[in-house]
Amino acid sequence: MKAKSLFFESHRGFTLVEVLIALLVMSVLSGMAWKGIDTMIRSKEYTEAAMERTLKLSVAAAQWEADLQAVYTTSSFPAISFDGMNLRIVRQSDKGAQVVVWSVQQGSWGRWASEFTKIRSVLQSYWQNSQMLQVNTPGFVSLVGDVQGWQIFCFRGNSWSNCQSSGDRENGMNSADNTAINQEKIPLALKMVLDFRSSTAEQPHQLIRSMVIPGGER
């Protein structure tokens, strides 16, 4: 009988305190594991968002450079004009000429482009209409968000200056159609400084891109 009693004593169950301690340890470990998984998920989402943003910036900057590569000079209005918010560019292709506007509207950097035309008066109307551009204007495409503002600098006379300042102008008469010429010369290069909002950094992030313009003043 004594041996049987010892046998049952060696197989007794856990006490209530031991069960509670085990549950506490398991809950702590589960919490730590969940926190680690949540951190991994957030890191993945942040990385994917950063990659998508970088891709959008690359595509937009490439289009911006392509517009400047195709600048079209006309005596009717400036080929390049910046008013602090909108950068207007007259560009040409095999289809004709068009007016392109790069603008910061309601925290978004975007692009608007008119139809191509080979009629001078129609192109001039596009230019005039582009001065009333809004974020809800049909054809305006928002490309990059969280934009705080931007600046455009022109390279003239061996130095950079704000493109809003007065540039060199060519005055006179056009012998071809006897119209007045009051055209701002195309700068040798353009530099864009795009500021982005940041909730963590004291200074906003910036995208700086310089571009030599074909046919610009020497």
Image (cartoon, rainbow, N blue to C red):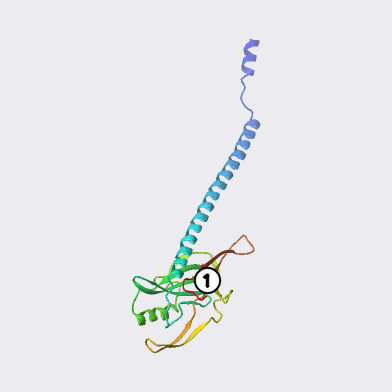
Q: Is residue 93 above or below residue 40?
A: below
Across and down, in percent, residue 94 comes to 34, 70
Q: Residue 35: which quarter of the image? A: top right
The percent coordinates of residue 49 (x first, y second) are 51, 55
**Type of residue at label 1?**
Leu
The residue carrying pointer 1 sits among few (fewer than 14), some (14 to 19) or many (20 or more) residues within 10 Å by Cα, namely many
Residue at position x 55%, y 46% in the image: 40
Q: Which residue is mark 1?
A: 190
Q: Quadrant of the N terminus?
A: top right
User: Does residue 115 appear anywhere in the picture?
Assistant: no
Residue 106 location in percent, x, y?
Answer: 50, 70
At 35% from the left edge and 73% from the top edge, which residue is drawn? 96
x then y, percent, for residue 147: 53, 66
Q: Residue at x 64, y 31 (%)?
A: 18
Question: Residue 184 vs residue 197: left or right?
Answer: left
Residue 13, placed above or below residue 209: above
69 or 110, nearer to the observer: 69
Q: Element at badge 1?
A: strand
Can residue 80 be spotted in the picture? yes
Q: Quadrant of residue 149?
A: bottom right
Q: Number of labelled discs? A: 1
Which residue is at a point 55% across and 44% down the rendered structure image? 37
114 displayed left or right of 185: left
Q: Quadrant of residue 67?
A: bottom left
Up-down: is 95 above or below 16?
below
Q: Nearer the viewer, residue 92 or 215?
A: 215
